[in-house]
Amino acid sequence: MPPPARRATGRALAAVALLPLVLSGCPHHSAPAVPLFAACAVPAGGWAPDEDRAAYALRLAGPVLQAGDGDAPDGCFAVWEGFLGADLGAGADAFWLRMADGAGRAWIVGVEIPGLARPFDAGATAAVDLDLAVEHSLPGGPILRPGRVAPLALSGGLVLRDAAGATLAWIGDGYPGIDAALLPASVAIARGEVAYRRGDSCGKFQGYDADVTAGGQTVSVPYGETREVGPFVVLHGGLDEITDVALACRYSVFAFGRARFAGVAVP
C-alpha cells in the first residue's frame, strides 16, 4: 500500500478539487458499485520539474528490465497527472514493470485490474501502449486549487501485449466517452439500457449498461458487473452522465459523464 503521506496528499487534492461541490451543498449521486482498476506510468526516478505531463503517448516494446508486485516505484500510482482509471493507490492486484522506450529512457508502468496477475518476469518481452490526456478545465470553467488549475479530467487507454502481440489486458477511460482508437482493434463499446436514475440538488444523473463487442461477439454487460465477451473478461467500471446540471454545480467533476472499462484475456 502507498505510504500514508501519499494517500493524505491524494485526499487533500481531491478535497480541494471538489470544494465547489461541497460549498454548493450538492451531494454525490448514488450509483451501483463498480469494479476498480487503474494504470499508471512515470519515468524511472520521477518527472523532471519542467516536464509537460498533460498528455503523452507511451510506446514500450522489448525486454522487461524489472518487475514486481504491489506498489510501483517512484510514486507511479500516486502521481496526480500520471494515472488513468480509479485513484486506487495500489492494492492486492497491483503489479509494475520497468521498461525502456525507443530513446533508452526507463519507465515504470503500474497496472491493477481485478483478476489479472503479473504476466511478466524480468527478461520477458512485453509491449505496453499507454495514452493519457489531462484536461485542466471542465465545461463552464476551470476548477482551481492553489497555484494551478486542478487536472480533474483524466482520460486515456492502456493495452498490454505479450511477445507474440496477443492482447493480455486493456483499460479505456474517458470523458464523456472512451476514444475508440485507445481500445484494442477488436473491441467496441456502446451505450445500453439505463441502469439507474437519480436526481438531487446538483441535477439529474443516470448510468447505463454497455453493449460490448470483442472478437466479433456482442454481449450486454450490466452496469458495475463483469462478463465474458469473446476473448476477454470485460469489467464495467461505470458509464454515467448528468442530464441536467444545476448552476451551482456546473464547475464540479460531475458536470459531464464518464466511461470506464477494462478487459483481461480469457485464460
Image (spheres, rainbow, N blue to C red):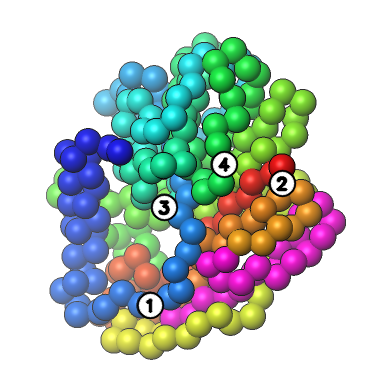
Residue indicated by mark 3: 86
Q: Which mark is residue 116?
A: 4
Say whether marks 1 and 2 touch (CB < 8 Å). Answer: no
Residue indicated by mark 2: 266
21 or 169, nearer to the observer:
169
Q: Quadrant of residue 161?
A: top right
* First along the sequence among labels 1 and 2: 1
Q: Is residue 151 above or below residue 77?
A: below
Which span of residues is magenta-colored? Answer: 205-225
Q: Looking at the picture, how far across and down is residue 143, in whole percent?
A: 26, 60
Q: Does the segment drawn in magenta span residue 210?
A: yes
* Distance from the alpha carbon under mark 1 to that under mark 3: 17 Å
- What residue is drawn where x is 36% and y is 84%? 203
Q: Looking at the picture, how far across and down is residue 86, in whole percent?
A: 41, 52
- What residue is drawn where x is 49% and y is 59%? 35
Residue indicated by mark 1: 30
Q: Which mark is residue 181?
A: none
Q: Looking at the picture, how far across and down is residue 231, in whole percent?
A: 76, 49
**Label 1 sits on what residue type?**
Ser
* Distance from the alpha carbon under mark 1 to that under mark 2: 32 Å
Q: Secondary structure at mark 4?
A: loop
